[in-house]
Amino acid sequence: MALSDDDVRRVAELVRIGLDESEVKPLGEELSRIFSWIEALREVDVAGVAPMTSVVEMQLRERDDAVTDGDCRDRILGNAPAADEGHFVVPRIIE
Amino acid sequence: MAAGDCSAVELVEACIAAQGAAADLNAVVAATAEQARAAARHADQRRHRNEARPLEGIPVAVKDIFCTRGVATTAGSRILDGFVPAYESTVGAKLWDAGAILLGKTNMDEFAMGSSNETSWWGPVRNPWSPAAGPSLVPGGSSGGSAAIVAARAVPAALGTDTGGSIRQPASFCGVVGLKPTYGRCSRWGIIAFASSLDQAGPLTRSVADAALILQHIAGFDPKDSTSADLPVPDLHAALHGDVKGLRVGIPAEYRLDTLPVAVGDLWEQGIAWFRAAGAELLDVSLPHTRYALPAYYIVAPAEASANLARYDGVRFGRRSAGRDPDDLYTRTRREGFGEEVRRRIMIGGYVLSEGYYDAYYLRAQQVRTRIAEDFRTAFREVDVLLTPTAPSSAFPEGAKTDDPLAMYVNDIFTVPASLAGLPAISVPAGLDDDRLPLGLQLIGRAFDEATLLRAAAALENAVGTLPSPMGSA
Amino acid sequence: MTGARTIVGATGEWELVIGLEVHAQVATRSKLFSGAATAFGAEPNAQVSLVDAAMPGMLPVINRAAVDQAIRTGLALGAEVNRFSVFDRKNYFYPDLPQGYQISQYRHPIVGTGELRVDLPDGRTRVVGIERLHLEQDAGKLVHDRSATDSHVDLNRAGIPLMEIVSRPDLRDWEEAGAYLRKLRALLRAIGSCDGNMEEGSLRADANVSVRRPGASLGTRCELKNLNSVRFLMRAIEVEARRQVAVIEAGEAVRQETRLYDPQRNETRAMRSKEDAHDYRYFPDPDLLPLRLSEARIEQLRDSLPELPDEIRERLIGEYGLTPYDASVLVAEPGAPGFFEAAARGRSGKRVANWIVTNLFGALNEAGRPLAESPVSAETLGQLVGLIEDGTISDRIARDVFEEMFRTGASPQSIVDARGLRQIQDTDAIDAAIDAALAANPGQLEQYHAGKTKVLGWFVGQVMKATRGQANPALVNARLRQKLDADGAG
Ligand SMILES: [Mg+2]
Ligand SMILES: [Zn+2]
């Protein structure tokens, strides 16, 4: 499975990782090598096999509907690179 | 470990001194000496009042992937530069509640992605077994700092996390015990996520008994983690008698690789002989899907990681790069904040989940996982534990595999299958190779049967006897 | 499609095809995956937990009440409740989405296909297919007006439980879309799974709109996002459909895109978004297990459902003889059926319904108050209708009395007594007033006798005026006619 340059650019954009144009080709080659190794999985007969959802047979646990958290704005904003008047701040979005 | 023949203050001071002496290992990224000293004084007071808790005064180093309240936590990444959690991981809180003392946050591969501790923003960790002359050896990874600092005798126990082998493989490389509990045994709350369906916390220690003691106090149900198992934790100490008469030990045929170094193969044979001598019943078993474990892992883990690491966007915590709009900010922050291996795995994860590829990659990998889990279930109908090598080699020199991701990934060939099946597994130091570097043997147990696993591990440890320490003496 | 509106363009007739995706906030105290509060109007970031802010190492734990309400809503829509459903991560980057993914349900939603019956003002009924209902987290809010260069992020809404209810493209005009949304809101309110408060954002609709020649295959659709009132929804659909017709008739093609409605300009415009931005890379959230529902749980929730709007509607028509339209309007308003039944006890249901639908709802609407805060109670409205029915006051007087009741909250009897509005039934008093009116207006009397019988009405007006509206109009009419004709003969 070979990744094209466009594949590499498209995925990099999806996951928001900046790439220099010079990195596209080598990264694509490296990923292609990894994916041809991964291709081995095609040999496995998976017809009718359920995908694993959890290693242990367990029920999803549900919690009671009660307010037990929040009201801790200082803890929420304490690590923010930029905050103002109780808000996180990001450069403006133009919609 | 809990012998209590010296005071907590003395023990902590000795460890602080040893960590200082071992500074060249680069195993600790955040020292917590002052708070540890205060905690030690407090521990001694409790002891005098006869209020000692089970781990009272025992210093424990913690991988920098555990969020520690008020202590910087980076997961080995530049993108978390400056992040100080306002909360403590469940597992950490349980340790401190049992009386243990935080002594050092340990270096690790960035976001636990690596098998050599060379991807850390803090730089590589040096294996204390590195020869005095010659290149530094890697400690393994990703819990390389935890393994190295325990091996260097600078702390009696450390916490690590294991996603595909990240406790067991560095334990093998550094000559310490490394235990990965059953998935769901220990809470993941407050541990920075790499691959949520695989991550599990566990101890690195010098003995099987210490590993059991630590696990006893970090295990248990946590309502804050939806994947935490609501099961009682057995008395693990009781399992340490080491009597394995009649225990059925399985040897998986598929783990006998042609490429296995002679020393590793010989040690495995030695392990088989030890168990036979101790009265265990040795059985050949087959795990037919073993060879698909690594490729499946390299789909599932990066896919989950690509989403888990989306929150590192420079908005709410950590390092931010300037950007003209949010997308520009994200793209720069993540490019500059993440190292090469993390970026590579996020790319792999993004690709396998993207439109048109989900079924072929992610879904298929999760189906293969089911197959692998079935293999183990079948084997465990006939045996009680499995015995395998932990890693396909001993510690290798720094830089030896950094240019070849696939060569690096193969380090986890023996550890990943149990991870994919969620099974408990332990690496026990079992001998030295021709270069006098430690090698571990791995035992894999049934889900939630850590007791039997530890019983077998104690027997193995007994049979091995005393190994030299990295500093030369026993 | 019979009855639905079409758009007549320069080249002929166009039909609309509309599907709605409604996001309904589940009525819970705490968030879908954290214990932070959901109450409206808190200080910014005051109702945010470490989980909602996606701090490293935080994990979701699901709220049982949100699951229960989704199941109840599914049952009320007559839909399949899936015994197995899965929470997926929907991956995209946006500053209001702290995790970098929304936890939603994609391949296996909790509720499958169902339907909603919609009654239209012209008496038609349309049964609209429900495609699915799934649970998901809401995102936070961006505030753009605090700075010229920055946006501020408030995560109070981040993690609030939503039900996304997706209809089939079965709606054919904006009236139908509005009626569908009203009906859905009534249903959610009736069972208590959502408060339906659109001003506070508890209910928002996205509309998929396309146009086609009647009976032709589907055209390209545009999605109108975040319509937060029934009125805006209807106006947005109409203006968007007209835009699409104009585009096609100008020889161009409609582009599939997301558009925003601007109520000020009454127009829609395309959102600025990247073309490739919609590969959400859904996969099951590994922090959560699949949700498996037992039969017992579903049956227990079924038993917890109150009488549903359609059931109430049928009963109101059958028991009280209401028109289907009045019955539909009553069930669309929360609390109204109960209000109606209390007021109608021992009285004409039809008349009471008419008073509620026309007068009371009109007044409440004008005052911007919900029925729950009505100054006129079911009891006093019933008394008012009782006074009309026993002839104490006329319909016209009743309207005045109602106005005062609405203003002051007083009982109709006390208003009638205090203002002396009791209808005059006494023929002597009425005769006296008639005599006075005839005597005072000889000119008009002359006209009547000359054959302009229309003047009779004018005299009725004079008499009513003289009695301040209190005379029984039927009686006035009869006595006046009698007198005029007797005069003429005499
Ligand atoms: Mg949608
Ligand atoms: Zn939605």
Image (cartoon, helix red, strand yellow):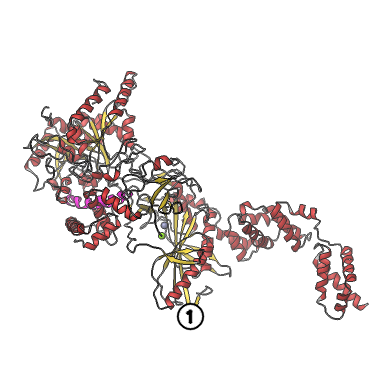
Kind of residue sitting beneath label 1: Ala
The quadrant where residue C216 appears:
bottom left
Q: Quadrant of ligand 2?
A: bottom left
User: Is residue B305 part of the magenta span, yes or no?
Assistant: yes
Vertical side of B109 occupied by C123: above or below: below
Vertical side of C346 occupied by B283: above or below: above
Vertical side of A54 occupied by B1: above or below: above
Magenta residues span B286-311
Vertical side of C481 occupied by C418: above or below: above
Could one spot residue C410 in this view of the protein?
yes
The picture places residue B238, in percent across and down from the top left corner, at: 25, 29
User: Is residue B280 part of the magenta span, yes or no?
Assistant: no
Where does label 1 land, which residue?
C10
Say which quadrant the C terminus of chain C sits in: bottom right
The picture places residue B268, in percent across and down from the top left corner, at: 11, 39
The picture places residue B372, in percent across and down from the top left corner, at: 22, 49
Q: Quick one: B75 or B227, which is closer to the camera?
A: B75
Taking the spot 60% from the left edge, 60% from the top edge, the residue there is C330
The quadrant where residue B140 appears:
top left
The picture places residue C328, in percent across and down from the top left corner, at: 59, 63
Taking the spot 16% from the left edge, 57% from the top edge, the residue there is A33
Which residue, as the protein is rendered here, is positioned at the far right?
Answer: C490
